[in-house]
Image (tube, helix red, strand yellow):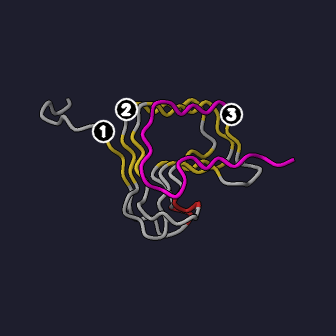
Amino acid sequence: MADPTNTLPAEIAFNSATSTATNYVVQFNGTSFISFDSLTLSSSTGTSYGTVIDFIGLNSTISVTNCQLNGSRNLSGSTNFAVVNKNSTNTNIINNLIFENNSINGGSYGLYLYGRSS
């Protein structure tokens, strides 16, 4: 049973990334049919890494709506601080991605979605 005195919004946070392998709060890796709605996702204190949502592998039908995405306040030009990151590897593919009505704070990039090459 839920605690009726807990009126704070649901939050998922991770602030201890120490390498590219752990640089995410949520990572989609070969994921399909996932929907996040009205959550707060935060990675706001990292000094070397600060990605909130990371995509690797083949992902399909992912929806993030009405969420607050809080990235690191380190504003270097590195993609290690992109709030949402899909890197340049050709094996990392996203089909049917929906980002709608979200608030994106901090980070070096809000959405860094690198397209496939030929």
The answer to whether residue 45 is left or right of residue 27 is left
Q: Is residue 4 above or below residue 75?
A: above
Residue 45: percent from left, percent from top: 37, 63
Q: Could you tell which of marks 3 and 2 lies nearer the N-terminus?
A: 2
The image quadrant of residue 5 is top left
Q: Do the residues labelled 2 and 1 touch (CB within 8 Å)?
A: yes
The image quadrant of residue 32 is top right
Residue at (36, 47) in percent of width and height: 12
**Residue stretch in magenta:** 96-118
Residue at (58, 64) in percent of width and height: 78
Cα–Cα gap, marks 2 and 1: 8 Å
Residue 23: percent from left, percent from top: 51, 60
Structural crowding at the residue carrying mark 1, measured as other residues with C-alpha within 10 Å and reported as few (<14), some (14–19) or many (≥20):
few
Checking the image for residue 38, the label placed there is 2
Question: Which residue type carries mark 3?
Answer: Asn
Question: Which residue type carries mark 2?
Answer: Ser
Assign a secondary structure to mark 2.
loop
Residue 114 magenta-highlighted? yes
Assign a secondary structure to mark 3.
strand
Residue at (65, 30) in percent of width and height: 96
What residue is pinned by disc 1? 10
